[in-house]
Image (tube, helix red, strand yellow):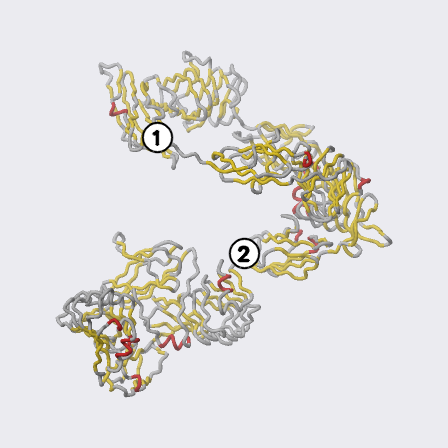
């Protein structure tokens, strides 16, 4: 018999009271993991066959075997009752589903015993009255709270309706102790006329909803103890009984001692009502109890059956920690250190002793009190924490809670004395909010999700921080460190430590400005991060000295702010001094400021060793042939510091011996291909390549005495050459070349270089050429022997003609060849054009229009369909020939074959109907025909046979000149849409010819597909006329919508900004705005149209904004950060520029422009 634990005894045991000091039970849920452990706990002769773990969200089967065949089964998941399991006949096992936490299976074997006519199931120290009782001979049933068998007492805590269906039962007596009446216990009980409730207090009966069902209780007499009628009449459901009668109290009550592991007691069999009682209890060896060995029951409590419950446990020490294991439940309780104290403690969710496992339910009061050596605590399950459990643990630094549901802390003194400001609580991902809102945990100031590190700021001056306070282990940190107005911040002003180690920006351990303006980045966070940032105060406006302008950044230091306007000429060279004197003070030049040389075109610039830092976009869009850096170690840079227009044409010169430092330095230097030491000589590099490109770029120079390397990449469809040539003026020079990867390395450059290489591409022969294809993709023509090609003959641009084509691959391996618009011979089928030798095994893919003339196949050939394929050929087959293109109707030769009728190419059928696909084929002479019908499986991209092969044989002596297939052979009834084909083959001796017929069946829809449309909303705007007019328009899915916009006279200097969402729509050449491929409702926004402002041709000033042009350079001076849009008079957006505080310079072609800044438009010509 199998009885699931559907109801649990709700009596609060004395052991729980002793452990928790009156705390209510609370259960948590184990952290969801990829795999969940499965534990077992058994009593009796029980075996459980189950896996040791199960995948999250999965299921598992388990089998239970007992000697009696009867047991109680209970399953908990993450400490909570688990009900999602059932019996599966196909597996002959229970199956548990939807697993999301640790599983504990508890099986207690039942022993069956008869007491009179009643059959009980016994386990440990409890009993149950199962529903499957035989009909009693007596009409009266007396329910008990305790039964006795073989000298032992077993408690019953409820009645589930074992006699509910027997109509001969007229009277039922309920015990006087606490007792549960479960649903449907008396819902039928047709003959019931009286109930005797023996409990003085009706609250002793816990009646679960539905216990009496819909039964009418008004006709049943309720008998209650003397003096308790009023209490019963005032409480439900007893108040539904119309007749309540009292009966006298008993003079004596039986005495029972119930407990697993109780060896003996001196309890009497009964005791007089109101008489006190003292009982001595002796436990079996190995058992312990929190109750005293002598128990006294005062006389005022002896007004019912005396049931003394003794809760016992066994004690075990695991990893130096003491646990008590309940003998009646699968629970354990943690009592703290038994051996020497430890620095790190893990309280597992489940502990195992022998073959049994127990959920750790609670950490008892005072368990680890005053354990000053304890530094780290890990709680693997939702284990309750009783009072003072960790009080006085002053060294506790971190607590790891694995449960996503906050662990229950029952008293605020559980962590009394722990430094809640310093101690870090680690919780699962997504659980920090719940812990921060939960009593007991919310007192801790540092609760973070497991696998995260803190971001701490210290020593910030003149800098605002915008970034996270926590970051996940192994992830990327991005935070903005924005200097306040009047301050400048460089990478040299920032100190970063991670995990206690100082990070070096020169070794790319952190970046500032590399991945965004003002952005500090750590690629991989592996520890707690501390950031210190001290910005430098900008002193005064820039001042001019020589050709350059400077700005004081700190005491005795300046940075280059820009180029003096009247000193700038295109192609000029600049030399930055290492120090300067200004107004009687000496300053070191330590930096180059943001955008200082932005847009400048220069021949060279020299940067002294005193420059420690180059700012954001200092050389943005600049052009320079040479940059001379006199510093032996790289100055600090940010992303865009040296973002010049073409780094491949710029040469960086560094001091002698400093080359290695720059090759391993910060981000920007890695983008320059030419980094030379001062005095280095270089040579020109030329490439003569066919079908190849060079990666990462094509070098134009190579430095004398050094190596140079690059990678050759073939064009699409081509292959790398087997060899290349490297030429010096003196002749051919050997080099290192990897034909698999394309990497070329020239060890030592000694002069000007020329690299010659030709990719292995398509074969494009002359039209009067005889071509022979050999093995390993080689070919022979009139001029070359054994040359290679990529397996393609011809191209997509034009027809390719050859005189004749022979394929002789010799080795019998399958060789793929593609014909692209190939004409062989004259195209006539009377003279031999293509020959496929006996030893060849080829697959020919046909692209475009191919005219092969007369084809003789002596080997094994398969024709495959390419793109836009047409074919004109007469095939004579003496080997194996398979045409899968469906373009040939006949093959001649010993196994000649003709398809006389093909199925309809694209039939349409109604839903529920079918069509017949039919092929008619014939063959002359001896023939062995076969027909195989297949359907294309789009999911697996393959053809699958849908009808058994049909074969027909015609002997040579047949009177008929040909053999014609029958309807049975050629028909296929089709009721499903899809692609179908029939392979028709003729085999005579070793010769086989196969032709293919195709058909694609579709289902005709009874109703046409609905037209899907979307709305396009065009707004009305002041200062412009729209065509069509403003309004909402309906557009079919995938279509486009266009409109034109004409500015009014007073608004014609505006630059319209047309957007859909965040996407800017630019006008076409005819001035229209077009939104293509519309697949959702859209609303068009039009901004930037304002009345014309007063402008000048050379210079514009507005408030703190100043705009002027000079020598091809546009200057914009702004008092605050904004964005400028440069638009041509034709309406095209030329460029969008982010304007910092101060002057911005950009090189643009001279002409007339509309400049749009902060809803104002300015027209300027220069």
- Please name the residue shown 16% across and 73% down the image: 140
Q: Tag 2: Cα neighbours inside 10 Å, few (<14), some, or many (≥20)?
A: some
Q: Nearer the viewer, residue 41 or 1147?
A: 1147
Task: Work out how far the residue at label 1 is from the one at label 2, CA to CA, in angstroms.
Answer: 56 Å
- Please name the residue shown 77% across and 45% down the image: 562
Q: In the rendering, which numbered label is found on residue 534?
A: none
Outermost residue, bottom direction? Answer: 275
- Please name the residue shown 36% across and 59% down the image: 52
Q: Nearer the viewer, mark 1 or mark 2?
A: 1
Q: Give how far across and how far down residue 850 sits, in percent.
A: 45, 19
Image quadrant in which the C terminus is located = top right
* Left or right of residue 388: residue 101: left
Outermost residue, top direction? Answer: 830
Question: Is the residue 344 above or below the residue 800 in the image?
Answer: below
Quadrant assignment, res 424: bottom right
Image quadrant in which the N terminus is located = bottom left
Q: Which residue is mark 2?
A: 472
Quadrant assignment, res 811: top left
Q: Give how far across and how far down residue 318 sits, in percent.
A: 42, 70
Q: In the rendering, which numbered label is found on residue 1004?
A: 1
Q: Give how far across and how far down residue 701 sits, in percent.
A: 69, 35
Q: Nearer the viewer, residue 381 or 147?
A: 147
Question: Is the residue 7 above or below the residue 229 in the image?
Answer: above
Q: Give how far across and how far down residue 106 sits, in percent.
A: 32, 65
């Amino acid at each position: 018999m199998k009885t699931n634990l559907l109801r649990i005894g709700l009596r609060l045991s004395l052991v729980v009271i002793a452990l928790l000091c009156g705390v209510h039970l609370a259960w948590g849920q184990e952290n969801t993991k990829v795999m969940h452990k499965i534990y077992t706990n058994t009593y009796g002769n029980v075996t459980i066959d189950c896996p040791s773990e199960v995948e999250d969200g999965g299921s598992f089967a388990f089998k239970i075997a007992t000697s009696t065949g009867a047991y109680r089964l209970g399953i908990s998941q993450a400490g909570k009752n688990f009900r999602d399991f059932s019996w599966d006949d196909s597996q002959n096992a229970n199956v548990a589903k939807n697993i999301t936490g640790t599983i504990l299976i508890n099986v207690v074997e039942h022993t069956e015993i008869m007491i009179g006519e009643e059959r009980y199931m016994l386990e440990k120290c409890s009993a149950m009255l199962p529903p499957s009782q035989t009909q009693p001979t007596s009409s009266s049933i007396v329910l008990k709270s305790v039964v006795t068998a073989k000298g032992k007492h077993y408690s019953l805590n409820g009645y589930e309706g074992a006699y509910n269906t027997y109509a001969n039962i007229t009277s039922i007596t309920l015990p006087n102790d606490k007792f549960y009446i479960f649903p449907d216990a008396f819902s039928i009980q047709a003959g019931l006329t009286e109930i005797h409730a023996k409990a003085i207090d009706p609250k002793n009966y816990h009646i679960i909803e539905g216990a009496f069902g819909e039964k009418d209780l008004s006709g049943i007499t309720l008998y209650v103890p003397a003096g308790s009628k009023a209490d019963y009449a005032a409480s439900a459901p007893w108040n539904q009984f119309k007749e309540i009668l009292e009966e006298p109290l008993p003079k004596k009550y039986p005495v029972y001692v119930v407990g697993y592991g109780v060896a003996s007691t001196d309890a009497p069999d009964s005791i007089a009502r109101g008489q006190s009682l003292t009982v001595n209890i002796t436990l079996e060896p190995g058992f312990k109890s929190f109750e005293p060995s002598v128990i006294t029951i005062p006389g005022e409590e002896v007004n019912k059956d005396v049931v003394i419950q003794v809760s016992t446990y066994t004690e075990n020490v695991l990893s130096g920690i003491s646990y008590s294991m309940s003998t009646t439940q699968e629970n354990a309780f943690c009592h703290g250190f038994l051996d020497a104290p430890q620095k790190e403690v893990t309280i597992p969710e489940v502990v195992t002793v022998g073959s049994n496992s127990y959920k750790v339910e609670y950490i008892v009061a005072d368990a680890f009190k005053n354990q000053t050596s304890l530094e780290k605590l890990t709680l693997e399950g939702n284990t309750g924490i009783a009072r003072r459990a960790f009080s006085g643990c002053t060294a506790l630094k971190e607590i790891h809670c694995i449960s996503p549901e906050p662990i229950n802390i029952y008293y605020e003194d559980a962590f009394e004395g722990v430094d809640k400001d310093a101690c870090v609580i680690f919780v699962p991902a997504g659980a920090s909010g719940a812990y921060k809102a939960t009593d007991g945990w919310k007192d801790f100031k540092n609760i973070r999700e497991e696998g995260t590190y803190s971001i701490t700021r210290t020593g910030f001056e003149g800098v605002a921080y915008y970034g996270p306070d926590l970051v996940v282990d192994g992830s990327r940190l991005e935070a903005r460190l924005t200097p306040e107005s009047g301050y400048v911040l460089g990478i040299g002003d920032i100190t970063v430590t991670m995990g206690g180690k100082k990070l070096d920006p020169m070794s790319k351990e952190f970046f500032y400005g590399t991945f965004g303006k003002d952005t500090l980045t750590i690629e991989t966070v592996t520890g707690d991060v501390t950031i210190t940032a001290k910005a430098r105060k900008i002193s005064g406006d820039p001042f001019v000295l020589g050709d350059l302008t400077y700005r004081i950044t700190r005491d005795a230091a300046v940075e280059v702010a820009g180029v003096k306007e009247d000193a700038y000429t295109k192609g000029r060279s600049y030399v930055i001094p290492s120090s300067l004197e200004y107004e009687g003070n000496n300053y070191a030049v330590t930096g180059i400021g943001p955008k200082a040389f932005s847009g400048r075109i220069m021949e060279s610039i020299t940067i002294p060793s005193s420059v420690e830092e180059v700012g954001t976009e200092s050389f943005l869009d600049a052009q320079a042939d040479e940059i001379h850096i006199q510093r032996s170690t790289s100055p600090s840079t940010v992303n865009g510091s040296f973002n010049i227009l073409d780094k491949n044409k710029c040469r960086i010169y560094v001091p002698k011996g400093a080359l290695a430092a720059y090759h391993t330095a910060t981000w920007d230097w890695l983008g320059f291909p030419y980094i030379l030491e001062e005095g280095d000589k270089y040579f020109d590099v030329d490439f003569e390549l066919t079908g190849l490109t060079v990666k990462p770029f094509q070098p134009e120079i190579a430095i004398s005495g050094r190596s140079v390397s690059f990678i050759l990449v073939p064009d699409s469809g081509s292959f790398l050459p087997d060899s290349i040539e490297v030429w010096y003026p003196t002749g051919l020079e050997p080099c290192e070349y990897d034909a698999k990867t394309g990497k070329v390395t020239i060890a030592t450059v000694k002069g000007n270089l020329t690299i010659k290489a030709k990719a292995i591409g398509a074969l494009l022969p002359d039209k009067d050429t005889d071509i022979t294809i050999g093995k390993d993709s080689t070919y022979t023509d009139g001029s070359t022997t054994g040359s290679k090609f990529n397996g393609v003959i011809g191209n997509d641009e034009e027809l390719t003609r050859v005189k004749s084509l022979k394929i002789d691959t010799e080795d019998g391996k399958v060789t793929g060849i593609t014909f692209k618009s190939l004409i062989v011979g004259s195209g006539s089928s009377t003279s031999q054009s293509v020959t496929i030798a006996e030893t060849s095994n080829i697959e020919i893919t046909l692209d475009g229009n191919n005219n092969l003339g007369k084809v003789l196949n002596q080997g094994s050939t398969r024709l495959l369909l390419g793109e836009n394929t047409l074919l004109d050929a007469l095939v004579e087959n003496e080997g194996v020939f398979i045409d899968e293109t469906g373009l040939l109707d006949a093959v001649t030769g010993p196994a000649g074959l003709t398809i006389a009728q093909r199925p309809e190419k694209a039939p349409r059928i109604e839903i529920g109907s079918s069509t017949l696909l039919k092929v008619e084929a014939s063959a002359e002479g001896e023939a062995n025909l076969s027909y195989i019908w297949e359907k294309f499986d789009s999911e697996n991209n393959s053809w699958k046979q849908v009808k058994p092969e049909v074969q027909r044989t015609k002997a040579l002596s047949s009177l008929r000149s040909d053999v014609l297939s029958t309807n049975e052979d050629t028909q296929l009834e089709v009721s499903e849409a899809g692609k179908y084909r029939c392979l028709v083959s003729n085999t005579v001796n070793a010769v086989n010819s196969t032709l293919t017929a195709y058909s694609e069946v579709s289902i005709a829809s009874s109703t046409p597909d609905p037209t899907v449309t979307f709305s396009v909303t065009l707004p009305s705007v002041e200062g412009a006329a729209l065509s069509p007019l403003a309004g909402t328009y309906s557009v079919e899915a995938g279509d486009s919508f266009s409109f034109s916009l004409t500015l009014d006279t007073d608004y014609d200097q505006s630059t319209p900004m047309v957007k859909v969402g965040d996407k800017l729509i630019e006008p076409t050449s005819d001035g229209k705005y077009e939104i293509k491929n519309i697949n959702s409702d859209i609303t068009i926004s039009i901004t930037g149209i304002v009345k014309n402002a007063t402008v000048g041709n050379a210079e514009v000033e507005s408030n703190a904004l100043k705009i002027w042009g000079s020598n091809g350079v546009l200057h914009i001076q702004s008092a605050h950060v904004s964005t400028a849009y440069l638009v041509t008079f034709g309406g095209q957006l030329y460029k969008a520029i982010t304007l910092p505080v101060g002057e911005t310079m950009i090189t643009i072609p001279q002409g007339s422009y509309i400049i749009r800044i902060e809803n104002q438009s300015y027209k300027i010509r220069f």
